[in-house]
Amino acid sequence: MTPLANDTFLRALAREPTDYTPVWLMRQAGRYLPEYNALRARAGSFLALAKTPALACEVTLQPLERFPLDAAILFSDILTVPDAMGLGLSFAEGEGPRFARPLRDEAEIRRLAAPDPAAELGYVLDAVRQIRAQLAGKIPLIGFSGSPYTLACYMVEGSGSSDFHRLKKMLYTRPDLLHRILEVNAIAVGQYLDAQIEAGAQAVMMFDTWGGNLSAGAYEEFSLGYARRALGSLRRERDGRKVPAILFTKGGGQWLEQMAASGFDALGLDWTTDIALARERVGSRVALQGNLDPGTLYATPERVRAEARRVLDSYGPHPGHVFNLGHGITPQASVEAVSALVDEVRTYSRVQRAELRSAGRSATNTG
Amino acid sequence: MTPLANDTFLRALAREPTDYTPVWLMRQAGRYLPEYNALRARAGSFLALAKTPALACEVTLQPLERFPLDAAILFSDILTVPDAMGLGLSFAEGEGPRFARPLRDEAEIRRLAAPDPAAELGYVLDAVRQIRAQLAGKIPLIGFSGSPYTLACYMVEGSGSSDFHRLKKMLYTRPDLLHRILEVNAIAVGQYLDAQIEAGAQAVMMFDTWGGNLSAGAYEEFSLGYARRALGSLRRERDGRKVPAILFTKGGGQWLEQMAASGFDALGLDWTTDIALARERVGSRVALQGNLDPGTLYATPERVRAEARRVLDSYGPHPGHVFNLGHGITPQASVEAVSALVDEVRTYSRVQRAELRSAGRSATNTG
């Protein structure tokens, strides 16, 4: 294995000092890129792209041609695991995910089993291997999955929802069934992420998109506990180096202390969390990833740069920050804005560190 | 004016001691009630109910026939103000609100003006007067409006949205236009709530349903600042008694300290906030209202009672708690569950206070 040419992202996750704040963007390969839309139109659908390793590889690399990002993220979906369980994932044009066979009766839930990643999710692992080969050690590759709870939300509800009433009905009337789904999901997500690491992923991220629909008291029981269980079952080293794990619970900003004690190396923050306060609360235990409002990418490059500096100033020039959005890039984001963002993070965070060093030197000189 | 027979709700908002924890439920007059659905079917639509004072009055009183609630809330919608501005509010069956004429160009925004409540929203004020007459001093009546920011979200977007990209685009590219809308909305909401108080509302609530889509840094500038401005312009006394004001920002649990310093008497909490922690953070400055997960109302009466006790135990037997859900009742909630909830809050909170008094006495005896 060639050593990584740019391991800034991995070092920031380990809270080691870096020359600048590394940056990548959730959904960085996506519909805001004309070359993505062209390839998707040729492939026919999002899932055709995601399920064809050569195309998933090509899409993964697209944003790297445009922007000096510090990490690549596998082009895939958070719901590949329940799809491999036989629930039948699809995406209607302009809509979110939908399952043809959501979990609606106890017998189905009892039959649920974790899929064998090599047999059922080989297309993902092939994509990981191809991407690693193409990246050729330039930057690290992030693997990912939905969290056990977020998978369960979609598996029970069949789609996204404003109130997830089927899921909540199960949670409050048949918690045993929900726990059964979550146990299977925790095993499945653990094995799946482990297989991604074996195939070449150098960091992993769990997207807990819907953990924020739980009550404060239920988050540990139904989401965090199972995320931790999945995390506990995967190898955490590859090529002689630790494989860091990131947990992102959208809407979970009030629970950062619990999340920071869960064994994950880093927490993703959505844009509603003040990153300076978050660092005060948990910064000494985990790295933080985030958290610019994705809506910022509708603005002029100048405004985007100012907002990026605001996040960087808020976190401060300390180790342990990975710059990102607080949620995925939207299709309406402008390429120009993304370009300005990535450039500003790189440039301004170098200046921050230089100022810190010079302040340190003058403190030494006068001390 | 007859004095209130039951002013527990108002005293809890003033953080005065009460014999039990008062309880009302957001959307307590709604689709989970068969008598509501029957009346709505006869009226033809939700808006026909809301815009006909006698029907709005009848619907407001429906849940009070079933449950010993401590407050009535005007049956209306959070979007009456922009409807009165001419945007054309409607509700398609099974969907959220929609405006026929959302704000899409600068000229429309420049023309926007606060409606005269007496002339344009007389149907609401008539409903308030009729409800007050019917209540005959039994329990207080809550008036309400959407917050200036939440109104703006719908006015710009035209409907609900998963990412509010039109709103965010305006916020980041033409903040001057958004501020112009918010200024008009703040005046309009202030005059509207003031007119409701004049007509008889004994407490008011501002629903900031979408404030939680803002970044931590933007919440004060675009939501809280204008909510405060609206609050500042309304009379705060009626019948020789203070009219308390409640602010509910869904998804705003991370910003309670800011909200507590805004002049509102009470903060609504959604179910993602730990109410014990919330009380630690702000409890000495404001009352707290909430915050049972609405999904709890799918459970058996026994489970509902246990969850209600959890919230009551979490807040503790201190003054300043108004029991409520963390969001509106859903149509799938069961009447039996609501009945158990209201009964348990009343019964158990009396026991809590008795235990507190007895602990106080034994502390005195042994001290």
Image (cartoon, coloured by chain):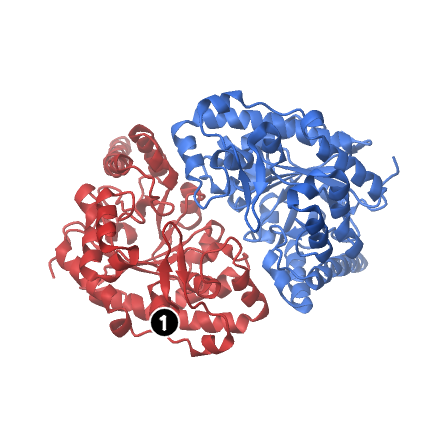
Chain colours: A red, B blue
Subunit under mark 1? A
Question: Against B170, is B281 above or below?
Answer: below
Task: Classify residue B248 as left or right of residue A203.
Answer: right
Give the residue number, with chain letter if any, for mark 1.
A85
Q: Quadrant of the N terminus of chain B?
A: top right
State the SS at label 1.
helix
Left or right? Give the position of B92 relative to A74.
Answer: right
Q: Looking at the rendering, which quadrant does residue A199 occupy?
A: bottom left
Residue at the image position 42 percent from the left and 68 percent from the top: A101
Residue found farthest to the right:
B2
Q: Residues within 10 Å of mark 1 (few under 14, many from 20)?
A: some
Report x, y in % for residue B160: 50, 43
Given residues B287 and B191, the one toward you in this image is B191
Q: Quadrant of the C terminus of chain B?
A: bottom right
- How many marks do you count on the picture? 1
Give the percent coordinates (x, y) of residue A223. 46, 62
- State whether residue B215 appears in this view: yes
Q: Is residue B231 left or right of residue B58?
A: left
Examine the rendering and report whether any part of residue B284 can be seen: no
Left or right of B183 in this view: A38: left
- Indicate the quadrant where residue B2 lies: top right
The residue located at (29%, 31%) in the rendering is A301
Q: Residue B173: where, in percent of width, then height?
A: 38, 29
Which residue is nearer to you in this view: A305 or B360?
A305
Along the viewing direction, whichever of B165 and B262 lies nearer the viewer? B165
Q: Amino acid at mark 1?
A: Met
Q: Position of residue B202 (x, y in %)?
A: 76, 37
